[in-house]
Image: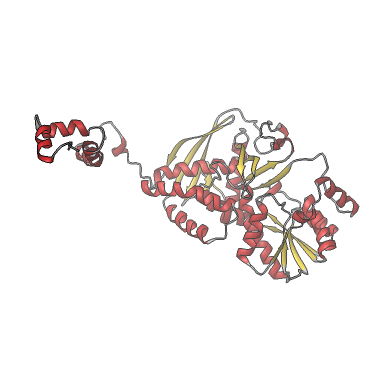
Amino acid sequence: MVAKRVVLAYSGGLDTSVAVRWLIEQQHVEVIALAVDVGQDGGSIDQAAIVERAKAAGAVEAAVVDAREEFAGEYCVPALKANALYEGRYPLVSALSRPLIVKHLVQAAHEHGADAVAHGCTGKGNDQVRFEVSTRALDPSLEVLAPVRSWGMTREQSILYAYDHGIPITATKEKVYSIDDNLWGRAIECGEMEDPWAVPPPGVWSLTRPGATEPRDLVIGFEHGVPVSVDGRALGLVDVIETVGRAVGSYGWGRLDMVENRRVGIKSRETYECPASLALILAHSDLESITLERDLAREKARLEPRYAELVYDGLWFSPLKQALDAFVDTSQQHVTGEVRLRLEPNSCTVTGRRSPDSLYDYGLATYDDADSFNHEDSAGFVRLWGLSVETWSARQGPGREATWSARQGPGREKEWSARQGPGREPT
């Protein structure tokens, strides 16, 4: 099938602006530019400028969808409930936004009668996987175009292409960093940070600029695993995330510097700023420590890394992800309460947690006069708990010989040999 009309995931940046004109000239298609607002640029993107830039590049139509509430409630919250951290550290900032963007791309393709969608991802990143797998999961009939993967232009050549075609851009050859941000955090890569030994320059940080010096407490309230309040004040999801991010970021906490394994097999040095998401996951996980039954908590902890891998690998729309969501949602029935975070320069720690559904029983836990635990029950419990190991040790383990001699008594070795024949030893 040869595409005639394409909906492009448009960011307003260099690559997607050049992609509009390149698709028109090289693929001979009409381009509809669609930007999805997931809280990038601190939640203050210039919608008019984005639309104007897309049309200046040649798009027949351009639109911006405000999806911040949808992103917070339908993408960030499920990841938060799952305490999703890729490779135990990264809260999936970019990975979470891609399936949402694809959802709106596919919807726009249906609305505008397009037979293809397009993205501005390179050939060695993760996002190409997320865009293309998600598109095929939602509508396998749509063709997916990847102009940046096809054209072979360097950054400098792309800038010259934009100049030659009168495409308004803000990129320069000196601006070497690649930034992707949304409500959940900010990803910074390229430039000197491609050397895993190089220290990230101070200028790359935006959300975690230390300024506050006096320690303070931040109390986050949850209902069924969803954050609903900060310091006792009820807030909407977007406001909770932004409020927590500003507070935690002002202490310089929430930075990540890691080498991660991309889906395509490359190890990549990545730096992230995630004050809101990391603080919320820290608080949520701690609240679960008093609200989840032991075996449920342990099984959930085993599944959380797998959940994060599915999201990172572009499998948001998949049967396993759907099944894990059902498990996670069930686990959150009693994850209601408050967690107190202590904020200090470059530090964010949990100092308290409480819940109306807490499984923490003071009478069972205390050693003072309020102790309600029946200590006499422990003797039989411990004996039965260790019975299997005790039996193994006596028959097969290190206590075998001593136990055998004691059981058989003096002179039993000779009697054994006589009865069993030459060379037979007790076993």
> What colour-coding does the image apply?
secondary structure
Which corner quadrant of the image does residue 272 belong to?
Answer: top right
Which one is nearer the viewer's eye here, 333 or 79? Answer: 79
Residue shown at 82%/39% (left/top)?
174
In the rendered image, the quadrant that contains the C terminus is: top left
Q: Is residue 373 something that shows in the picture? A: no
Front residue of 156 and 85? 156
105 is higher (above) or lower (below) than 11: below
Q: Is residue 150 left or right of residue 125?
A: right
Is residue 138 something one can see in this rendering? yes
Q: Residue shown at 63%/35% (left/top)? A: 250
Q: Quadrant of the N terminus?
A: bottom right
Number of disc labels: 0
Residue 147 sits in which quadrant?
Answer: bottom right
> In this rendering, is residue 146 above or below 234?
below
Q: Position of residue 387 (x, y in %)?
A: 22, 40
Residue ID at (76%, 70%): 2
Q: Position of residue 35 (x, y in %)?
A: 72, 57
Q: Position of residue 95 (x, y in %)?
A: 62, 51
User: In the rendering, at what x and y percent does residue 215 appear?
Assistant: 55, 29
Left or right: where 412 falls relative to 339: left
Q: Is residue 34 above or below residue 415?
A: below
Residue found at the far front of this picture: 422
